[in-house]
Structures are given as C-alpha cells and as structure tokens.
Amino acid sequence: MSDTTASIDAQSNPLLAAWDTPHQTPPFDAIRPEHFLPAFERAFADHTAEIAAISHDPAEPDFANTITALERSGKLLSKVAAVFYDLVSAHSNPAILEIDKEVSLRMARHWNPIMMNAVLFGRIALLYDNRKTLTLTGEEQRLLERTYTRFRRAGAGLKDEAKARMAEINEQLAQLGTTFSHHVLGDEQDWFLELGEDDRAGLSDSFVAAAKAAAEERGMPGKAIVTLSRSSVEPFLQSSARRDLREKVFKAFTARGDNGNANDNNAVIGQILALREESAKIMGFPNFAAYRLEDSMAKTPEAVRGLLERVWKPARAKALADRDQLQALIAEEGGNFKLEAWDWRYYAEKLRQAKANFDDASIKPYLSLDNMVAAAFDCATRLFGITFAERKDIPVWHPDVRVWEIKAPDGSHKALFYGDYFARPSKRSGAWMTSLRDQQKLDGDTAPLIINVCNFAKGADGQPSLLSPDDARTLFHEFGHGLHGILSNVTYPSLSGTSVFTDFVELPSQLYEHWQERPEVLQTFAKHYQTGEPLPQDLLERFLAARRFNQGFATVEFVSSALIDLEFHTQPASASKDVRAFEKAELEKIGMPQEIALRHRPTQFGHIFSGDHYAAGYYSYMWSEVMDADAFGAFEEAGNIFDPAVAKRLHDNVYSSGGSLDPEAAYVAFRGREPEPDALLRRRGLLDIPAAA
C-alpha cells in the first residue's frame, strides 16, 4: 500500500484516523461495516511488520527489545478488533455477521505465524532460561513468564509439520466458533411467543410491560411477546399460570441450536471437540482438559472433578428433597401430573411464597435498574474512593447505551464505563464485561474504556426497567468484572485488568455480588419506583431469609453443566459424536434429576463452544466461589462491609493488580491465608446435607 493510499484511507476510514472524541473514544456514529475489512488489512500488515522487526533485530535479545517490544506491537489491531467484536456481540446486523465469518479466519491466519515463530520464541526462551540473572521488577518477571508460557502453549516449540497442522486446526476452530455463535443468535432472533390477553394469567404488570417493549423492539407495536432472552424466559417460567405456554417456551429455550434446521449446532460441536483433542495430543497432553487446566489454578481435571463432585452430592440431595415438596404441592392443588422441568420455577416460587412469604414480584418494584446501578457505583465509591458522573457527549453504538466518567480519589480521570443493559434482537444473549481499551502505563498512562452488557427487559411506555433479584445480582457481578478493568494499575497491557487465569477471573465479579444483597445497601437504594418509599423492613427480612431457597436447583443446573463440559474435554471426541446421546448418558451417570435441565445445553453452550475461553473451564465460576465466599468473610470479621483497611488490601492485591501477581499469592496477600473450602457450601446452605441415593 502506498503512502498516498494510506493517507486517503486514514482520512476516510474512522478506524484508521486519530480519534478526536472525548478521551479518544471510538466514534461509533461514524463507523460503518464497510470500514472494518480495510482497517483489519492495515492492522494485520502493521502488526506483521512490527513482529518481523523484533524477530530480526540483530541486537542480543533483552527484555526491552523483545518482551517490551512485543507489548508495544499490535496497537492498531487491538483498537480495531475491540470495536468490531463489541458490535458483533452487542449490536450486530447481517453485514457485521458476514464480515465476522471472514475476520475470524483472517485473525487465526494472522496470529498463527506469530505465535509459532521459531526465531521470536528463541529470543523469548533465551530470556526465560536466564531470567534469574536478569534485573527485573516483579511485574516484569511475571510478564516474561506469562509470555513464554503463552508462546509455548501455542506450539512455538513444535516441529514444522506439527506447527502446520496446529495452524490448520486454529483456523478451523475459529470458523467453527463463529458459526456456533451465529447459529444460537439465529435461533434466538427467529423465535418469539405472542401473548394474547388470555395468555397472560399470572404474569405481573411489569413483565407484561417488558413483553410489550420487546415487541416494540421487534417492530410489533401494540403486541406483547416472550423472547428467548434468559431475562424474558426465566420470569415467564416462574410466574405464568399457563402450563401449556410454559412448556412451549421452555422447549424453545432449551432447543436453541438443536432444531435440525440451518442453525443446528450438533455437527459443529463434534468437529470442535475432535479438533481440540487433536491439538491437545500434538501438544503432548492426553486430552484437551489436561492441556487447558495445566495453565490454571486447578492444574488438573482431577482437581476440578473433585470440587464439582463434592458440591454435586449435597446439591443433588437438596434438589431431590425440594422436588418431592413441589410434587406434593401440585397434588395439594389437585394437579394430576408429574412435575416437569418447565414446572419447577413456577411451583418453587409458590413454595417460596408459602414457606418464606416472599416472591420476586413483591421486591421487583424496589429494584429499578437506575437505583441498582447507583447502588453498584456507591459501593465502589465507599470501598475504593472512585466517583462517577454520567457523560452525554461520548459516542455509543446504540441509543440505549449510557456512559459514565470515573475519577480517582484525587479527582483525576480514571476510566470511562459503558452500560448497555437492555435486551434487543441485535444482541447475543447473556451478560458480559469487555473493554474497548485496556489500562496500561507503558508509554504514559492509558485510561481504560470498560463495557458491561446485559439483557434486562426494558420497561414499556416510559416506565423504568424493574429487576428481579437475580437480575440485580447479575448487574453487580458484571460490574465486579468492570471494576477489575477500571481499577487496573499495571504497566504492561498483557497483564491488564482481567488478564488472569480463568478460574481466578470470576473472583472480583462474584465477590462484588455480596454487596448487592446486604441490608446496608438495600435500605439505601431499594426504593419503590412509583412512590419512592424505601424497601419495608419486613420485606427486606423476608428477602434475606429467602436467599437460600431453591439453592439445590441452582447448584444442580450449574454443576451439571460444568461436569458435562469436563466430560466433553476429557473423554475421546469419538464418544460424543452423537451429542444428544452423550448428554443423555452423562446426565444419567451423575443421577441428574429429570425435573431439572442443564443451565446450558451443549448446542447453546456459548461459554465453551463459541470460542475456547471457558472450554474445560466452566467450573471456574465455582472455583472462584470458594474464594469469594471466603473473601467476603474478611469484611464481616472486620465488622464493616466497607472497612477501609480490608478494602485497601482487596484493591491492591485483587482489583488493581491484574495478572501481575500469581493468583494464589494475590489471594493470600489479601486474606492472610488460603480460602476455607467449606465457605461455598455454607453460603449456599448445603453444608452437612446427606447425599441422596
């Protein structure tokens, strides 16, 4: 590409031009789908040239000309990719999704020769082998170790034939992961259930308002619909008195990616698992789980299975006892049918109302989205001294997105935080945190741009969005991830924010959930959306008392999914060629109650099949929960959930340290000891429950 062409491209393509927006944020209002491929082309070329310069540097390898140079490379690629993947997940359209198919392949083809570059790896390995003789800071030592590990695990030390095959596998996996996620999104976009007046029995006014807003979003004004967003499905299953409609919604939700149509994911899963198994064996591991877990806190599949089975036994026993109570409740009401999976949430809610005198509908009017956002921000202010102010001048990718500027305790600019909270057809399901730019200090302070994306139901006709307790907990969870990025205080981008082991990354998020359900927080921020009245004391007490209700169900649907993930990646890929048969056999093996479904059936299990970030790693949420249940105890022991000394240790060793510390050392530095394993079972009310037959 000539300098003249490059200049014209930079002027006409906002992804290649300097951003003169506030805090150099992406100019989403100017970015079009056709800008991405030329921007990626330039970014790939620039990065390739940067890597070549490092590899062929005639000077003796040292930390600056190799490791630091690697950290400085690929800035344009990171910039373009962050914007692109935000849109793919949060606000896609057919043009973006079509580009995604090409970009996923091009991305793999770009990174393969870098991560398997023998000359580059030779420079890194030389430094790693001599690391004890180098004068490095603790963060530099950690970066050298992580860089060496990353290249080694990518196959940089393999022979040429093995490298070539690994490159082919990586390309195929990239395409298959993209196909998997597009299939799930396709099924979610294609299906909805229209609710006539006779179909609304049991549904709250707030749910109907949200169903009308969902219809409006799909161009169906005046209608009300249930979509396949979890925030629509779960409250419907919990409150709809129409058993026939509950069954219809449940079956559609659990059949995503498994309908035998153009969006079917069964064959895709088989191909992904076979390729992962082959790649693990090329790397010298017996299976993909062994490969993946080598670079984690857990270390081995056996350690993961040990934790999951320890939790599974009391959780299953509790779920079976609850099942019997739900079946008895059906009989008491004169129902002559067996409890099914689409009945569980409905009758569990009835049982909770009877036993704990509490239901979600009674507290939702006090949990408006705006108030829960304010609560999450206030807790961060009280813990870490940061402050929040909404900005209306930052370009966003959808009108619903809101942006806040975050300032450090000294009043200096710290970060920008984007909140994209509402479900819409252009957004994939679920909730997640990501970034448009990570914090670093390599060449001056770079402030992060952090995103939270959720799928809450929007209120209709100007009414606020009202959250269920689960929704409110999700909001705090994702903001906990957000704080991990916001508070990051490291020098090198590869160690920034959430760049930690998968089974440690959920600690900051799950720990932050604890503040959402504390009386000190709810008494201040849980106010009725119409009257402004605070949450009544008796309702607060009933909510707190009901928190452990249905924990057997919640734990079983999660742990069963984690066990299925582990089995997919420890057994030979040939064992799961028939995905449905494999799923059925594994659930029978663990004694899965027929009345409970997996939280994520395989054909929609995006955590492990849309990419490989959580492949053989879904257990991570529970591994982190062992730590988070124990970690909050530090505040309880101090007698103040905002204790300044405990908060400072948490900030310094967990939230701000990114990947610069070994996670086990980071936890011990915060807590003063290793986590106490029974804290998880105690928190879920599962301690000392006898195992069922």
Image (cartoon, helix red, strand yellow):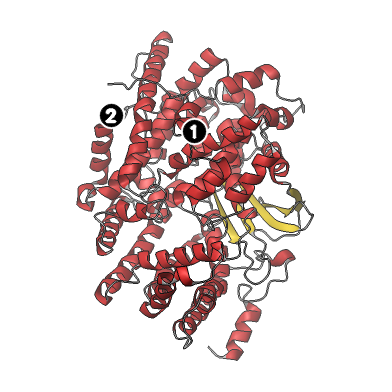
Question: SS class of the residue under badge 1?
Answer: helix
Q: Is residue 308 above or below residue 188?
A: above
Q: Is residue 595 above or below residue 68?
A: above
Whether residue 497 is visible, yes or no, is: yes
Residue at x 67%, y 62% (from the top left corner): 447
Residue at x 64%, y 60% (from the top left corner): 448
Q: Using residue 384 as the reference point, say whether residue 545 is left or right of it.
A: left
Residue hosting label 2: 591
> In this view of the protein, which residue sits in the foreground, 524 or 367?
524
- Expressed as whole percent of the image width and height from the top left, the position of residue 548 reads 51, 24
- Check residue 172 in the rendering and tell me which mark sits there, or answer none: none
Q: Using residue 667 as the reference point, say whether residue 687 is left or right of it.
A: left
- Expressed as whole percent of the image width and height from the top left, the position of residue 602 reads 34, 45
Residue at x 49%, y 81% (from the top left corner): 45
Q: Using residue 492 as the reference point, say whether residue 414 is left or right of it.
A: right
Which kind of residue does numbered mark 2 sit on? Gly
In this view, which residue lies farthest toward the right?
Answer: 411
Which mark sits nearer the N-terminus, 2 or 1? 1
- Expressed as whole percent of the image width and height from the top left, the position of residue 432 reads 54, 49
**Callout in the foreground (2, 1):** 2
Residue hosting label 1: 234
Which kind of residue does numbered mark 1 sit on? Glu
Disc 2 versus disc 1: distance between alpha carbons? Answer: 24 Å
Q: Is residue 661 above or below residue 238?
A: below
